[in-house]
Amino acid sequence: MNIQSILTNEQLYPYLLKARYGIEKESQRVTTEGDLVTTDYPQKLGNRSYHPYIQTDFAETQMELVTPVTDNISDLFRWLAAIHDTVYRSMEPNEMLWPLSMPPALPKTEEDIVIAKLDNFEDVLYRRYLAKTYGRRKQMVSGIHFNFEFDDEMIQKMFELQEEYENYDQFKTEVYLKVARNYLHYRWLTTYFFGASPLSNPRYFNGYKHPTEPVRSIRNSEYGYKNLEDVKVTYRSVKEYVADIQQMVEEGKLSEEKEFYAAVRLRGGESVADLADKPIRYIELRNIDLDPYQPYGIGQKEVEFLHLFMLFLLWTDEKAEPDEWVEQGEQMNNFVALESPLAQTVYYDQAKSLIVAMRDFVEQIALPVSTEILDRLEEMLEDPKQTLAGRVYLDAQKRTQKELGKQEGLSYYEKAWQAPYQLAGFTNMELSTQIFMFDAIQKGFDIEVLDEQDQFLELNAQDHTEYVKNGNMTSKDTYITPLIMENKTVTKKLLHRTGFRVPQGKEFTSEKAANGSYEEFRDKSIVVKPKSTNFGLGITVFEEGPSKEDYEKAINTAFQEDGSVLIEDFIPGTEYRFFVIGDEVKAILLRVPANVIGDGKQSIQELVAQKNSDPLRGENHRTPLEKIQLGASEELVLHQQGYTFDSVPDQGETVYLRDNSNVSTGGDSFDMTDEFSEDYKQLAVQVAQTLGATICGVDIIIPDIAAPASAVDAYGIIEANFNPMMHMHCYPYRGKGRRLTMDILRLLYPDFVK
Amino acid sequence: MNIQSILTNEQLYPYLLKARYGIEKESQRVTTEGDLVTTDYPQKLGNRSYHPYIQTDFAETQMELVTPVTDNISDLFRWLAAIHDTVYRSMEPNEMLWPLSMPPALPKTEEDIVIAKLDNFEDVLYRRYLAKTYGRRKQMVSGIHFNFEFDDEMIQKMFELQEEYENYDQFKTEVYLKVARNYLHYRWLTTYFFGASPLSNPRYFNGYKHPTEPVRSIRNSEYGYKNLEDVKVTYRSVKEYVADIQQMVEEGKLSEEKEFYAAVRLRGGESVADLADKPIRYIELRNIDLDPYQPYGIGQKEVEFLHLFMLFLLWTDEKAEPDEWVEQGEQMNNFVALESPLAQTVYYDQAKSLIVAMRDFVEQIALPVSTEILDRLEEMLEDPKQTLAGRVYLDAQKRTQKELGKQEGLSYYEKAWQAPYQLAGFTNMELSTQIFMFDAIQKGFDIEVLDEQDQFLELNAQDHTEYVKNGNMTSKDTYITPLIMENKTVTKKLLHRTGFRVPQGKEFTSEKAANGSYEEFRDKSIVVKPKSTNFGLGITVFEEGPSKEDYEKAINTAFQEDGSVLIEDFIPGTEYRFFVIGDEVKAILLRVPANVIGDGKQSIQELVAQKNSDPLRGENHRTPLEKIQLGASEELVLHQQGYTFDSVPDQGETVYLRDNSNVSTGGDSFDMTDEFSEDYKQLAVQVAQTLGATICGVDIIIPDIAAPASAVDAYGIIEANFNPMMHMHCYPYRGKGRRLTMDILRLLYPDFVK
């Protein structure tokens, strides 16, 4: 099989840079002082027995973060970011993740290293066995497992272009076997460039044999966490690989298959035995040290290199019998791992020619990758100080390894807490969905983003699937209910008929007809609004009868949002948003229309700019509050008060720029949940039930919240919203946040989210 | 109480012409030959034991049509129209309604008049009693009961403006009592103008005492269907009215309260006794003869007059002691009823001055009614030939009464069958909703149109409410399901993952990016379509790789419908629409793209105009098919075939104007339900179930319907629709109609619609 002629075939071209990726990353929990924590696994996280993204490794302090399998590198890093964000903000406020592969200072007594308190007793027994066999300290090292799968279409095209193999599965297995052996042979190269465990804390080895000088990678050397000498497994063929592992287990040299700690594992199904009748599906590279200069322990460039390296290893012929080829690699790797981090490697010439070969390879298959990666490798080869090991060593010299770990760790910790409402990796989604995803990741839902732009998620847990849009559109509401709420005429009819107080009004379908009815409304308090609107757009309120000019302007504004416009009684009082889930009001919010407070100097326009500079204010529902706009609606509202954008309000004077109080038009939000008595909450629940809604936001005007809801004119129901923004309740301008996103998860999975 | 000063108070002005109306109308079923039918109550109609709109009166042949209470006259007539349409098209194809109050020729033997076969045995017993007391023939007369209720705000304003009564309920009762007594006094006026039963069929009286000459109204005379002489009830006060009726029942002079056949009934709650503790809520005028010249037995002008008359009777003082006042009215009415239909009435002077008084009244309270009504009354007063009785009499002279009844009846019958897909009264609603309402009225649902423009209905039956929009959006689907279907990316992901064959593709959010990907698609069969679209707008198909120009045009067209555009594999074959309800495919439709067939002479534009002239083709889903458009999409499709709108196709050549086959863009529809084997139906049901849908339209491309669905490439799922048009299945271009609307009703009320 001439692999090089196959790989250069243009049919393969679209698939070479496609692949599937997954990362498992271990990290020790430490305090913000850099000391190993003594706390248990964070309680806020869902049960680690089933958690798809957040597990524990050997010790109770050793988090294991697992990404889902992704189709591209950018998604891989989005998930790494999101899972890290969730872990950081689910731990105690003074806890963070240790960014280095080598652990922080360990307890004096080995028994003080607490084995992970897992539910499954077999898992605990396994860890006890490991503690006994290798010692607890050795287990405290952390790293990254990188799972890599070629695009299946690429392997299929390759299969079609060769003649040696008749069986596709066999061919596929051979592809991965070759890459695995070549990786085992050449992995000293990754150890040279990305090895990042030059130093250990004195108590790590605690009397065991250990390197006496700084090295490139303790973890990848003979002193690292590896199987005992008598464990030997061949990569000659899958059959022999499986047989060897099974024999090791039978002979008791391994307690279980998963104790086989090779730098590369061949992966098919769930267990090693599955490889007997299934092809290799992907390979797991287990030798990656944590890069302390990257927030997630590995950089995007390193992953890009690994992908390129996998292709190169597929392209490059093996130059010895398989076992010998692998054994040579073992030795070279150990040698490189134990070199001084600042020394030129003894394999400098080989490395140099490998980089040349990679350049040549990239050129021959015209791979559209930036040569920057290879340029960088060359620099690192020429200057060992630029390798990761070199940098870590030098940095630790400057400020001690603890200080290095603490400072780098703190910078990631601070980033995670900087905008605690956001979910890193998914900040382009609406804020409510970000919060919802955070909670879902925290509790251990298996999540798929079905359509990012449309805020469309799939949740899986307990063998049950739910689909969620915008964080609050679910299967728990029927189709007709939002249609009822969307239609204000129908909503009002149903509520009025059931006996709720709703403003009465008239509907117009032409601007002319609406303008013609001016006489009817000239002396009334009215609201002019589009029949269907979200976010309060196009609404104008006249507390006293409008002038003809303002009336017509308001009509015009409303018709720009919808073909039907309602003119309704204006019910005086304050409007509150009641967020109903099931038969409970979970949050009540007072929203104050967009406003500025004068200082006697700045114009309204300037005051708005000042208020908008608050980082909590953003656009398009990506922040808890929205920026105040300076549009036609604001102009009209100011005009009614005799102001323009250039007016300068007095010191302390509050000037409102909107009549509607929606947060989405720049309003402020105040949590009032605990200020209301039960009767108003019951009222809101009854409104929701009348409309058949499980999840909805009911807007109620109440002149006096101290008066009972049964009093005359105690309230007026304005409308019910089928897509109520949750984030403004979760992160109000003032007052206690209400975690509605978690309530929705609980509604969908009552037994899963307690 | 100075009622006149109260009624002229401007506060009342907005309410005077507001009222609530309801009509009950009896009609005999006859054959299209004008003979009384011998068939039973139409089987297609829901059970008359609970039917809110369609009942039977005394005889099995005597339909009683009951409108809901409406807030305005126009709605009253819409419901009359809709109920009539439903009745006509639910009877045997050769049956219609007899338009006259006096019945058609009756059977020789009285026993051949079949008493209504009601489920409730008490109802049957009551009719047997009536047959015995009054004779069966007498019962065969028909008329209209007109229920009238003043606007409640009007009576409240009146109450506030007077000082005589302290109790509102009492005041309200007195208002109606006065109107009732005045109506009983002056009703001879309506008998003069609108009496319409001058002649009887000889067998109607069959030996009983009867008028020997033509009169104005047999039905309103002493020969009409009225209580026996010894039944006397006063209208002095409600208390006495109730007591009198109860006494008559106790003494056996009436079998039940409802046997009290006065020209005016006072109505409060369900039974007469309810008036003891509730005010009169409305009055029922029972003396209206059927107007054979009106399709629904009464004209809008007559109702407008009755409303004006009610106000006038409230305004006009009584001029004698109550019983005497009523008794005078009885006598005058009987006298007028028995006058010759062509004679000037003996009360000409009184009538003249009443019309003057009404003119004066209209002027004094500045009532915005057209004086046309009063002008018309004056003409009828001057010329008895113009009264209804005069017209019916003269017409019957010309062509016999049977011929008159038959011809007028046939004209209404033909109108009802002219566009059998429409529902008269509601033709401005979408056709699917019209068909749905027809079925719901037929089966006896209590229906409220919550929002006409939005096709929003409420159904009530069996103490259970359902809301329905567009005839197919119901509580049986969850909120998330249509959101899944609306998002084609999500739909495809879920279907592909479950193993269905779906076209693969790419999504673009900018025109530039989409245009930039031309190379990828230049040699492929593709469909370019907006991510969200209804009715197939913005879709372009390229069966062979597109030219760059056409590709960019298609991209541009698609982006005009949505901000996201999909380019997908084009799967060759024919597209079918599978309509799924629950776990069944209820209909399968083949839609053929808008097309014309050439005649070698006319241009495409002319051929389109010709095809569009078919009355089955309309616009905006008000007809079974839509007119073919001549827009940018059509132009592009023709251009791809080398045509313009002015090209002249050869004789017999089919030219397609669209690539998409939607009926809404002018396509033709063919029912194929019985052509498919079970496996394709199961496939469609499984697709619906995968998306969680109860009601949906699945579009599947199938190259060969004879091949099994399990064959390789047997099908491709295009999309699923959450608002599939039902009317195109109910009334296809060719093939059997499928009554999906009834299936939806059955889904919502399985026990009610069998």
Image (tube, coloured by chain):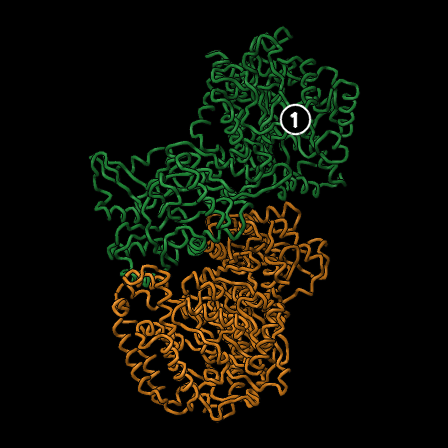
Chain colours: A orange, B green
Of A62 and A97, nearer the camera is A62
The residue sitting at 34% across, 63% down in the picture is: A171
Q: Is residue A151 left or right of residue A110?
A: left
| Residue A6: quarter of image | bottom left
x then y, percent, for residue B241? 75, 26
| Residue A686, placed above or below residue B663 | below
Of A274 and A13, nearer the camera is A274
| Residue A731: quarter of image | bottom right
**Pointer 1 indicates a residue of which chain?**
B
x then y, percent, for residue A82? 50, 71
Q: Is residue A307 left or right of residue B215?
A: left
Q: Is residue B335 left or right of residue A189?
A: right
Can residue A65 be seen by looking at this rendering?
no
Can residue A110 be seen by looking at this rendering?
yes
Residue to which mark 1 is pinned: B183
Q: Secondary structure at mark 1?
A: helix
| Residue B4, placed above or below residue A8 | above
x then y, percent, for residue A453? 44, 62
x then y, percent, for residue B339? 59, 13
Question: What amino acid is labelled 1 in the image?
Answer: Tyr
Q: Is residue B267 left or right of residue A720?
A: right
**How many numbered dots are placed on residues in this image?**
1
Other-residue count near label 1 (Cα within 10 Å), few / some / many at <14 / 14–19 / ≥20: many
